[in-house]
Image (spheres, rainbow, N blue to C red):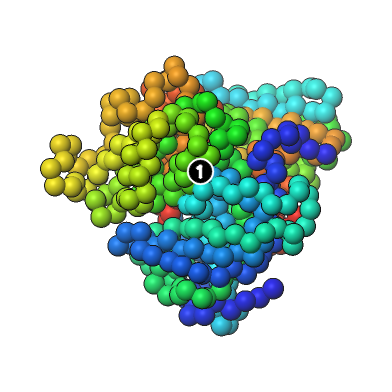
Amino acid sequence: MTEAPARLGARYARPSGWQVATLVDAWAESPSARTLVLEVAHWPGHMAGQHVDLRLTAPDGYRAERSYSVGSAATRSTVPEGSALDGAAPARVELTVQRVAGGEVSTYLTDVFAVGDAIELRGPVGGWFVWSPERDAGTPVLLAAGGSGLVPLMAMLRTRREAGDRTPVRLVYSVRRPEDRLYVDDLDRLVAAHDGLDVQVVYTRSTPLGSVRGPGRLERRELAAWGWPAEIEPACFVCGPTGFVEALARQLVSLGHDPARIRTERFGPAAD
Amino acid sequence: MSTLTPGFHGRPRPQGVALPPGQYVETGFPVLSAGPTPRLDTASWRLDVTTETGVTRSWSWAELMALPQDEPTVDIHCVTRWSKFGTTWRGVSLDTLLAEVESTADFAMVGSYGGYTTNLPVSELLGGKAWIAHTFDGAPLHPVHGGPARLLVPHLYFWKSAKWVNSITLMPMDRQGFWERLGYHDLGDPWREQRYQGD
């Protein structure tokens, strides 16, 4: 007996079991981040913002599991609700992994994992930090990304493009240095479409040549100017390290945004 | 299914500690929540326990503090795969809190300031296994970690340990909370790796 309402997310709510995926392509997304293209034999479809679990097994049987957000656009469900995963079609899923110093899994995925290698994968997972044009079109969106927190938000932007959706979206993206930016070319293409997407990049440590704004964390007044006014009641998605997410969510609340419209996802080893 | 991952060796294995499957040892205290951190004032804080017959019993902050206090030292396990050993807390055992509550319900929905919910069997809340915790590592529990008070159910994945706890609703039938509706497990036993529905 459940309270589960008939919502789109519920279709994806039950993650399937583990299956083997194969790395079919990979490239550096920045000096410290790598995009992995995984061929998944049975992919039930995913919503933008969802993640997958990866499982690695060492020769002595030791296993490590981690979650990584999908960066590629949403894919439609290929199986009727409730049916077996075996019927699902193959698909290619892109993840972007930020190398964490000393990280046992991220360093493997960025430095060792080679095209042709297999890895165990489970997913997609997560139905809260998601956006879909079918469900959410018409409500303006504010995306706030810190560092590799851009990955699930990029999936939302790519999904919006593929759907031909024109929901007004503002992205505020905070990175340490220019070279840390992810998806530089694709973000430029998205903006160049002039279809209602606005992007502001903030550098916290060093700025590109000729930048008017000096390095520094995103300030409340900047968020007020670049984000939507609270009266517009945008859907807010905030993703990044804990410090970034805490600061941004707090600023949004202080600017009058209803906490119920602010969805957060925290990344990385950030401990406090 | 077991597939070797070529070239993967992993960190040195932890010695002398029991780590549930798929978990790694974390020495910091990561923060996870689905929305903004609410800032709550203990002056207006309250905890409501409502039975299946609709009877509600409430505690103010002062009343909570006046109850007998426990100081559990426990290991905690987050479904995002970190485990933290030997965490020290101070709070009120649910055995103490619920002792006088008249109920035959088998399930509980725990609710939080901010709207978060999570469901647990009542049996997992009783028997020295769960607390309303207000102090971590000797200091008042920080808001990002659920302060002023959170549920602490360390033998289950930590999303069951609802931050900013505000209510416990006793139910004869199980219903699903926030993450459970989104596909996470109704019980969430880390030793059986019950991360998702169906595990």
Residue topped by disc 1 = A162
In the rendered image, residue A135, in percent from the top left (x then y), is placed at: 61, 33
Q: In this view of the protein, which residue sits in the foreground, A117 or A264?
A: A117
Identify the image quadrant of residue B199.
bottom right
- Judged left or right of residue B93, residue A207 is left
Tell me which residue sits at (77%, 57%) in the image.
Answer: A84
**Residue B3 placement (x, y as % from top left):** 62, 76
Coordinates of residue B130 in the picture (x, y in percent): 67, 45
| Chain of the residue displaying label 1 | A
| A172 in relation to B32, above or below | above
Res. B79 visible in picture: yes
Decide which of B4, A188 is in the foreground and name it: A188
Of residue B86 and residue A77, the one placed in the foreground of this image is A77
- Give the amino acid type for the residue marked by disc 1 in the picture: Glu
Left or right of residue A39, residue B182 in this image: right
CA neighbours of label 1 inside 10 A, class few (<14), some (14 to 19), many (20+): few
Residue B16: % across, % down: 56, 73
As helix, strand or loop, the secondary structure at mark 1 comes to helix
**Residue at point 69% right, 73% down?**
B1
Q: Which residue is drawn at 46% across and 67% down?
A: A25
Q: Which of A173 and B87 is in front in this view?
A: A173
Position of A201 with respect to B140 (left or right) is left
Residue B85 visible in the picture: no
